[in-house]
Amino acid sequence: MIEKLKNLPTQAGVYQYFDKDGRLLYVGKAKNLKNRVRSYFSFTPTLTPSPKVSPRIHKMLTETVNLEYIVVDTEHDALILENSLIKQLKPKYNILLRDDKTYPYIYIDMDDDFPRFEITRKVVKKPHIKYFGPYSSGARDIVDSIYEIFPLVQRKANIKSQKKCLFYQIKKCLAPCEGLVTKQEYKKIVDTAFSYITDKKKLTNKLEEKMLSLAQELKFEEATTLRDRINKITNSMTVSTIDLAKIENFDIFAIHTQDEIACAVMIFVRDGKVISNDHHIFKSEFGFDLDELYKTIMINHYKKDLPFIPKEILLYHKSEIKDDIYEFILNTHNKKTNIKTPQKGDKKRLTNLALTNAKELLRVQSTKTDSILKEVKKLFGLSRIPYSVEGYDNSHMMGSARVGSIIYWEDKFVKQNYRHYNLSSHDEYAQMKELLTRRLEELEKKPLPDLLVIDGGETLLNLALKIVKQKNIFVDIVAIAKEKRDAKAQRAKGRARDVIWCELGEFKLNPDDKRLHFVQNIRDEAHRFAISFHKKQKLKEDKKLSLLKSDGIGEATIKKLIQYFGTFEKIKSASTDELEKVVGKAKAKILKQGE
C-alpha cells in the first residue's frame, strides 16, 4: 500500500480502495492521482488517515488495505469513468443515485403548417422545435388542458384526412383540414396557448371557468374530469412568491442532510417562472459529503440528451465541484454555464426556497421501517442497511411459458421499477442464472439495490453469489426457501417456518418474527408478479400451440417440440431437417405444410 502511494502517477484518473476481503469500498476521480490520493493520508510517524478527512472517509480508510487506479487522458474522462464504476460496482462508501429520471418536455414543431403540442422525453431532431419543461409531473394534464381550451388540431391523423371530423362538430377544432382557418389565424391561437403553458395559475383559472360552465349545463362527468386535472396541475406547482422581472432561465439545486438521510431538490426556472421541481432522497448509514451529493445529482441530470441547458445554474451551498460540472456540461453539450452560489436578491431567495423544500421533504419522510432494516442488517451480517431491495423469482408450467420477475422495494413497492423477462432456460437453476445475468447486464442504466432476495434455497444463493463475484460486484444477497411439510410448500404467514440463507449460513426464525416477515413480503411480491406474467404468457402460448393441434399434431408431440425448441416461434421457424430429428418425417411434413 505504501509503495503504491509513493509511486502514484501525476496524470488524471480514477482510484479505488479495497478492504481485506477484496470488497470495493470507494471510487474517486482525480485531476492528479498522486496529489489527490496522498491527500487522504498522513505519512508520519506511520501511515494513517489524514485528520482533515470527514468521519465517513476516515472510517473507510481504516478498512482500506489495497489501492488500485486507472489512468485516463483527461479529467472529464475520469469523471465519466468514476460515474460508470460507481453505478456498476456499487462501492460501499460512495453515494449512489438509483432513480435516474428522464423528465418529459412539451414540444411543438413550428415548421408544421398547423402545429400540435406533444410530449417527448428525447430531443426531437428537427430545426424549429419549441420546448417547454422539464416537468417532474403534470405534463400530460397540461397538454390535455390546452386541447380542452383551444380549438387546435386534436389528433395527428385529423389534419391528413382533409375532411371535417367530430372535433369540428363539438367546436374543439377549426377544421384546417378543409381550409376553414388560415395558417396565420391558427398561429395566433398557438401563440396564446404558449402563455397558458408557461403560467399554470392562468391555466387552472381558465379550467375552473370551464368546469363551472359544464356543471351548470349538468355535464357533471366532464366537470369532474376537469376538476381532477386542475388538482393534478395545482399539485405540480412550486409555491413561490418571487416574481422575477427579467426573463431568465436557470436550474437550482439545494441539499439538506439530517443524520442518515439527505434530500436533494431541483427547481427549474424558464422565462422567469418556476415551472417544475423534483427531489431525490438518499439514505446512508455512513453519512454524507455535500460536494459528492451535488456532483452525483448534477452529473446524472446533465449527462442526458437535454433539449435545453440554461446559461446559469444556482447552488445553495458553495461547492468545490463547480469546475467539474462546468467542464462536464461543456464536454457533453458544448454549452458554457455559469455555476454560482448567490448571496442576495431573488436568486438567493430561490435557492432558499429550494432548501426549505428539502427540509420539509425530510421532515415528512417516513422512517418507520428503518429500525426493522437495521435489525435485518445485523441478523444476516449485511454490509449495509437494506434501504432498497430487489426480489427475484421464476415461473413456468411443465417447461412452458418460462418467465422471470424482478420487483423493487424502497420504503414501499415501487411498481414502475418492476421488470419481467421471458427466459429460454428449462430448469430452475438455469433460469435463475439467466435472470441474474441479464439483470447484471443493465447496471449502467439501473444500479443494483442494497439487497437481493432470491426465491430459493442454499443452492440458488450460492449461484447468485458466484455470479456477482465473477463480475467483481459485491452486493448482499439472501435466499428464502419455503418450508415443506409432507413434501408440500407452506406459504401462510404466521405459520410457515421459511428457511433463510445468507453468507453467514442458515436461519430458521419464529413465524411471528418481523425480520422474517420483511423477507417474506419481498419474496411473495416477486412470486405474485412472476405468476401474473406467467399466466399472460401461458395464455399467448396456448393460443399459438392450438394452431399446431389444428394441424393434426397431438399433445405428446407438442410437448416434445416445446422441450426441444423452447418457444412456438422457434418451432415455426425450424427447418424440415430440424423437425425430423425431433418428431420424424411424417409429422415434420405436416408441420411445414401447415405454415
Image (cartoon, grey):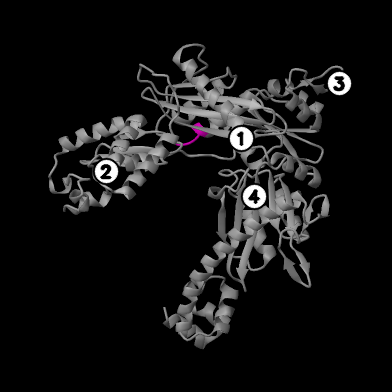
Residue positioned 65% across, 62% down in the render: 431
Residue positioned 50% across, 22% down in the render: 353
- Residue 213: x %, y % from top left: 26, 41
Query: What whole-number distance in Å separates the C-alpha atoms at marks 4 and 3?
Result: 43 Å
Secondary structure state at the residue bearing disc 4: strand
Q: Is residue 451 above or below residue 570?
A: above
* Sequence-first disc among 1 and 2: 2
- Residue 386: x %, y % from top left: 70, 43
Residue 365, numbered circle: 1
Query: What whole-number distance in Å separates the C-alpha atoms at marks 1 and 4?
Result: 21 Å
Q: Along the horizontal axis of the image, is 440 left or right of 195?
A: right
Q: Amino acid at mark 4?
A: Glu
Residue 139, numbered circle: none
In the rendered image, residue 302 lying in the magenta stretch gets the answer yes
Query: What whole-number distance in Å separates the C-alpha atoms at marks 2 and 3?
Result: 83 Å
Query: What whole-number distance in Å separates the C-alpha atoms at marks 4 and 2?
Result: 51 Å
Residue 216, numbered circle: 2
Residue 46, numbered circle: 3
Q: Nearer the viewer, residue 148 or 401?
A: 148
The magenta region covers: 301-305
For label 2, the crowd category at 10 Å Cα-Cα, with few meaning under 14, some 14 to 19 and many 20 or more, is few
Q: Is residue 521 above or below residue 53?
A: below
* Sequence-first disc among 1 and 4: 1
Q: Along the horizontal axis of the image, is 147 left or right of 476?
A: left
